[in-house]
Image (cartoon, rainbow, N blue to C red):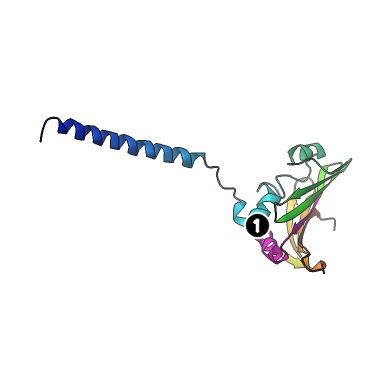
Amino acid sequence: MSQQKLPLMFSFKIKKQKIAVLCLLIGVIISSCKSPKSPLAEYGPIFEKVMVSDTSVFRGFNFGDSLNFVQLKETNKPIEVDEGYLYYEYKLDSEGSFNIAYNFDELGLNEIHSDIFINDSDNADEVFNKFKTYFDEHFGTSQAQMGFTIWSVKSEKYGEIIINLSNESTDFTSDKAPGKISLWIYPDKS
């Protein structure tokens, strides 16, 4: 082999190694830039958009939180605001919409009610089951009471809290009516 070909071959191998290292570096950078998947994603996009956070019982809020704290942390401006009440409405892209009513007393947040409207009513059972699975996994096995699915959770300020979930889709009688899931979280006053 001639002396001139040897450095040329050696130079080609070094360039090839540099390209391989560069590609590896780019791959590592791209994979590290991807945001981590939310733990709520496994329950579906509607569930994830409604719940927002897996801390506390709903959207990252705890019973006893102040009205100002909830208003500050919510992702939109409220449609209605009163001394002890906040009301929000949200779109779920083409999937539907949901609303949230927060009630407050002298101790803070003491009741949450959300209605989730699903444009394709055939998906209402699936969405309901995602909520049920999540609450079962986080708060124990549910109980069925008078057509409602119920969990009981402890709260520092209010004692026993009831999570009440129902699929109210059959309440709508017209064709093409949306499905409706109702979620109500309140202190057990019994």
Residue at (82% x, 40% y) in the render = 67
On screen, residue 28 above or below 177: above
Magenta-colored stretch includes residue 116: yes
Decide which of 63, 11 is in the foreground and name it: 11
Q: Position of residue 23 (x, y in %)?
A: 38, 39
Q: Front-most of 109 and 2?
A: 2
Of helix, strand and loop, which one carries label 1?
A: helix
Residue 168 position by quadrant: bottom right
Q: Position of residue 49 (x, y in %)?
A: 68, 50
- Amino acid type shown at disc 1: Tyr
**Which image quarter is the N terminus in?**
top left
**Magenta stretch in the rendered image:** 112-135
Q: Measured from the top left, where is residue 184 in percent x and y?
A: 79, 56
Apparent side of residue 11 relative to residue 166 in the rendered image (left or right) = left
Residue lying at 79% horizontally and 45% vertically, measured from the top left = 157
Find disc 1 in the rendering and name its residue. Answer: 134
Please identify the quadrant where the C terminus is shown. Answer: bottom right
